[in-house]
Amino acid sequence: MKTCDSQSCCTVIPDSCEKPDIPDEKFRTLRYLTYIVPLLVLWWFVYGELESFSRLVTYSVLHLQHGRRLSGAVEFFIFEAPKVLMLLLLVVFGVGVVRSFFTPEKTRAILAGKRESIGNVLAALLGIVTPFCSCSAVPLFIGFVTTGVPLGVTFSFLISAPMINEIAVVLLYGLFGWKVAAIYISTGLLIAMIAGWIIGKLHMEPYLEDWVLQIKTSGSGMVEEKLTWADRIQYGLDAIKDIVGKVWPYVLVGIAIGAGIHGYVPEGFMASIMGKSAWWSVPLAVVIGVPMYSNAAGIIPVVHALIEKGAALGTVLAFMMSVIGLSFPEAVILRKVLKPRLIAVFFGVVAFGIMIVGYLFNVLM
């Protein structure tokens, strides 16, 4: 058995020395890149041919006739389903790598002690790239409040994180284009910033549950692990497995419903219900959307089909934001740490902001 000198190796193993960490990490990174670069080239080629592929399958393989409702629905589904899933794969990987720089501990450290106005902006922006779901609302909320993050800043984060995520951005870009996606992101951030600022100015801290205020923290107590680029790439790959692996059924169901609306609902049908002329459509869309429980993957393809059939963009945005950003299950989870009055204020302020956005875009677009 050979032993290794402490200067060259930190462990003792039979017959050989363990490779130093740095060269090993560089090798891992290069190995990932040799796989990822060709896959990106293949992705780009396939993505550019999806429209031709959908027409080929619909009319040459399945022999459906042009102009029929069924053929329109089938072509819509065959084109949109792989397009959205491919965009999800790419963006979820990229956002996963970015998220490796923003752990919950680091997010709390960034937000703690910030002034309300600056904190609201930072919290809304960090909500986009920070892992968040309704299941993690309670521990994140407690962690933020007990480490000195102002209450209004915390709410800016809680509004932004579920409403503006990579799934919503990918679906909006894939189905509507970059302009609508940019509108959704900017208005979502604005709602998160202003709503959090208003809640902070109302000084609602007494409406936190007493046990939350009694929690005392003793610093972070954690040494954050230093990640290499190979680790961050793996983080992105794990994000694909975790996120895309969970939402792809919702994507397909949502696109299938959207395909049915696309093929069978007459043009302009939704204008009388969700059009600009129906002044009551925006508040009704919010009232209907809040009790619903769905994620972006399930609701956005349906929204796309509604707009095609005459629904107004502002009304549809209001409906989508209320479904994704507010939900009854979220209220149930937050009830563990918030008193009913604070929950009502939270939902009321956000719902009012969403309605303003809906009316504004119905007027401007």
Image: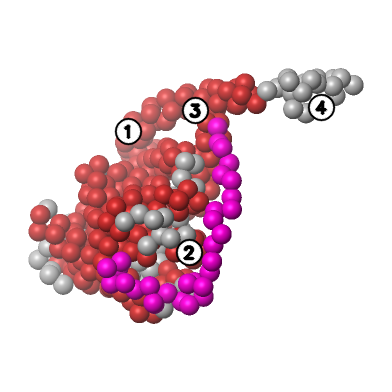
Say what amino acid the circle numbered 2 marks: Thr
The Cα–Cα distance between marks 4 and 1, rounded to whole angstroms, is 59 Å
The outermost residue toward the bottom is 340
Residue drawn 56% across and 59% down?
A: 218
Say what amino acid the circle numbered 1 marks: Ser
Under tag 3, what secondary structure? Answer: helix
The Cα–Cα distance between marks 3 and 2, rounded to whole angstroms, is 41 Å
| Main secondary structure found in the magenta portion | loop
Q: Which of marks 3 and 4 is in front?
A: 4
Q: Which of marks 2 and 4 is nearer the N terminus?
A: 4
Under tag 1, what secondary structure? Answer: helix
Residue on which the image places disc 1: 52
State the extent of the magenta-drawn residues as a range. 199-228
Residue drawn 55% across and 36% down?
A: 227
Residue on which the image places disc 2: 146
Say what amino acid the circle numbered 3 marks: Ile
Residue on which the image places disc 4: 12
Q: Is residue 268 left or right of 54 when viewed as pictured? A: left
Say what amino acid the circle numbered 4 marks: Val
Using a 10 Å C-alpha cutoff, classify the residue at mark 2 as few (fewer than 14 neighbours), some (14 to 19) or many (20 or more): many
